[in-house]
Image (cartoon, grey):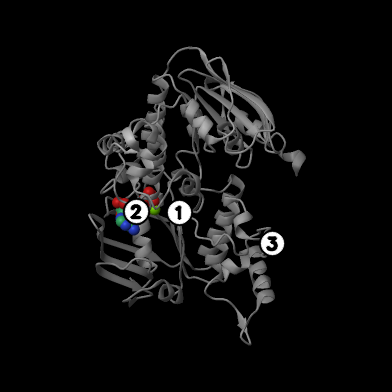
Amino acid sequence: MADYIVELLNVTKIFPGVKALDNVSFNLKAGEILALLGENGAGKSTLMKVLSGVYTKDSGLIKVFGEIVEGLTPKKAQDLGIAIIHQELNMCSHLSVAENIFLGREIVRNGILAQKEMNAEAKKILDSLSLDIDPETIVGTLPVSKQQMVEIAKALSTNAKILIMDEPTSALTAKEIEELFKIIRKLRDEGRGIVYISHRLEELRYIVDRVTILRDGQFIKTMDFKDTDMREIISLMVGRDIKEKYPRIECGVRKKIFEVKNLNAGRMVRNINLELYEGEIVGIAGLMGAGRTETSRAIFGADPKDSGEIWLHGRKVTINSPADAIREGIVVVPEDRKKYGLCTKLSIKNNISLPNLNRLIMFLGYINKKQENIMSQTAVDNLKIKLTSADANADSLSGGNQQKVVVGKWLANNSKIIIFDEPTRGIDVAAKVEIYNIMNQLKRQGIGVLFISSELPEILGISDRIIVMCDGRITGEMLASEATQDKILELATKFETKLA
Ligand SMILES: Nc1ncnc2c1ncn2[C@@H]1O[C@H](COP(=O)(O)OP(=O)(O)OP(=O)(O)O)[C@@H](O)[C@H]1O
Ligand SMILES: [Mg+2]
């Protein structure tokens, strides 16, 4: 017993209308990596927020290093050696990397902020993580993956003994993930206890010692990783067996509906040519930073195009803004849902109706509330969005359910071309299958789907055709039936060696 550095006993946490944690018990040893698993909304983040003093438990007991702790606050948790890297990025984007790392614990000498010293300290921490980031860089100018690494550096800078990582890899490249795993293993070998939350179940085997599974706010099971397998883990998470991880449907050949010709936009979109047929899912594979998101933004009119044409149903269309694109029925489900996909301070219902107002506005500009309710209820039902009320703020939803709302608002629109940019990021196994089924449903309706993803198994499993991008260019194209991971990877790294 004494080797548990964290013990949570019968912890309950109730939010208005939802029991997020129902008598959950949990423990963590020194020198282990424990994966905390469960579907979207299972209570993983809530449990870890209780442990790190962000939320106050309604009942139950918290023991840290064998001592009962009461009245936990974030500050108190930090003093006890607990650090948490939150699921959604938490950086102050207008401050520098060093300022973020030392936020709230600034080094002060003679009443003056010791900028130089903090920069030097920050540099040391970044170096120890092999991160080539200047501590004076303004965080907002860094790509998401780098911001994520700064979060990790920040957590480590407190010299935490208990480190909680809530989906740390969801925005990282394969190389960065490898680096991160090295760091995590090193931290474990130094005797720290690490709680690791992830929906990327394939990663677990590289780092995990034990797994704890939650379902619907309840503790289900804790096991040694070596004594279990993916099948058991998934069925415990979901409460049933999942028959098919990648449901695929065939629709047959149909007519061409969409074409992008010689599209150029900045450095990351170079001479892109692609076409999409009715009821076809085209996967766009590539490493992070290959220019896939930039391409989708240029198509959507979110970024200016330097040159190129877009054709829809044999007609050349002009798209200079997202409003133009939405009018034509070309929409994007963006990768950074918090920044571009959702108004987190609006209700779930409003988020769904916002891009569809043209169909809800009645005589004199009033909104048809009844129709709005039906629209949001349809999206909630279709996507099985887990919520207490559609009137709640979008940010009260668990991460994965927020993603579903973003998908839901475009489904309510009469879209013809839907670009999904990493739609399953942060989404649990069962919900992933739901998203694939939605794509299949769109396919059946004759909608063209562009499916950007960095996870090769799902690209291979769901697409009809696959386009590979590297360094802003298309480096290859093939039918999914002829594709392999190796072929795709080769094309995805075509210019890598040259760049390095
Ligand atoms: N601040 C909040 N206010 C109201 N309800 C909340 C709040 N935070 C979480 N919940 C609810 O508590 C439940 C558990 O959510 P939690 O975020 O802990 O899930 P999770 O397991 O981390 O899911 P995900 O994998 O999607 O991140 C969900 O039903 C969620 O809607
Ligand atoms: Mg979560």
Task: Please rate how many residues cluster around mark 3, counting C-alpha atoms within 10 Å: few if below 14, some from 14 to 19, many from 20.
Answer: some
Question: Mark 3 against mark 2, which lies toward the viewer?
Answer: 2
In the rendered image, residue 395, in percent from the top left (x then y), is placed at: 38, 52
Residue for point 32% across, 43% down? 349
Secondary structure type for disc 3: loop
Q: Quadrant of residue 297?
A: top right
Going by the numbered disc 2, the residue's amino acid type is: Ser
Cα separation between marks 3 and 2:
35 Å
Q: Quadrant of the N terminus?
A: bottom left
Residue for point 51% across, 42% down? 335
Q: Name the residue nearer the viewer: 434 or 487.
A: 434
Which residue lies under the disc numbered 3?
Answer: 134
In the rendered image, residue 215, in percent from the top left (x then y), is placed at: 28, 50
For residue 442, above or below residue 203: above
Cα separation between marks 1 and 2:
29 Å
Q: Is residue 426 left or right of residue 102?
A: left
Spot the residue most to the bottom: 110
Confirm or reject: label 2 Cβ below 8 Å from ligand 1.
Answer: yes
Which residue lies under the disc numbered 2?
Answer: 396
In the rendered image, residue 449, in percent from the top left (x then y), is placed at: 48, 26
- Viewer can see residue 213: no
Q: Earlier in the sequence, mark 1 or mark 3?
A: 3
